[in-house]
Amino acid sequence: MAGIGGPAPEDGAAADEGAEPDDAVVGGHVALPSAPPVGPDDIVDPRAKAPRSRRPPVGGVLLFGIAIAMWWPAFTLGAWGDLFFDQLLTVWVASTVMVFVVLLQPRPYPRRALQVALLLIPTLWLVLTFVPADDDENFGVLLGEILALTVALLGIPFTIWTLARLVWPEFGSQLGRGRRLVAILALVVTTVGSYALGANQEHFLTCEDFSISGNSEPPGCVHEPTPAPAP
């Protein structure tokens, strides 16, 4: 029942004058939370550079892999004066697989024909080995020997390089001219050094070292000194 002398209060009106309004709703609108105060440490200098992301040393990993694959053919060439058939056939298998990988790359693929032609060099060497030779002066024999050296000394790094470019397309652009020269120089030094070690194996290896590792004794190797019999 309404009091005398004034209208009845509406339903939902605040009963207590000291009640505070809800923090989430002020005047019928949703109030957003206030931002924390900004201190001097929170001010970002626009001239400051963003931290550079650390790129993985892809070039170093690639160079390491090529050097590991190259040292043994170079060493055998210096120690035995020849290349083992398993080394050449390994390069042929890897390069043949890479030929199909390159051919299956979507267009456009730069220098596709050149890469395929270079990767087919081990196949050409293998075909020439089936050509009958009458004597050692046959042109096919000479060409086969040259291709065998090319397969072993150039086919291995080129095959690995092609694989790296397929896995990391931006790899070539990450290496400047100076880094490429350093990588080539390091590869040449390790390959020539491995050949020199093979050619001078008698100074630090023995025939027994080759025998116990499952290899044949290279020409010019020295045997371990036989201990004198006890008196």
Image (cartoon, rainbow, N blue to C red):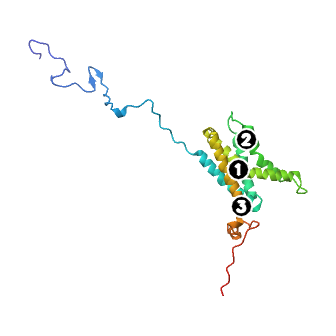
Tell me the residue at 77%/47% (across/down): 121
The quadrant of the rendering that contains the N terminus is top left
The quadrant of the rendering that contains the C terminus is bottom right
In front of the other: 161 or 231:
231
**Which of pointers 3 and 2 lies earlier in the amino acid sequence?**
2
User: Where is 79 relative to 29, above or below?
Assistant: below
| Label 2: element kind | helix
Q: Position of residue 38 (x, y in %)?
A: 33, 30
In the rendered structure, find residue 73 and report the number of the disc placed on it. none
Q: Residues within 10 Å of mark 2 (few under 14, many from 20)?
A: some
| Label 3: element kind | helix
User: Where is 152 relative to 217, above or below?
Assistant: above
> Which amino acid does the dot numbered 2 rest on?
Gln
Q: Which residue is mark 2?
A: 115
Q: Which residue is mark 1?
A: 156
Q: Are marks 1 and 2 in contact (CB under 8 Å)?
A: no
> Which amino acid does the dot numbered 1 rest on?
Ile
Query: Does 44 sit left or right of 130 as displayed?
Result: left
Tell me the residue at 71%/72% (across/down): 223
Q: Position of residue 76 (x, y in %)?
A: 73, 60
Query: Does 104 sit left or right of 47 as displayed?
Result: right
In front of the other: 13 or 59:
59
Residue 219, quarter of picture: bottom right
In front of the other: 228 or 66:
228
> Which amino acid does the dot numbered 3 rest on?
Gly
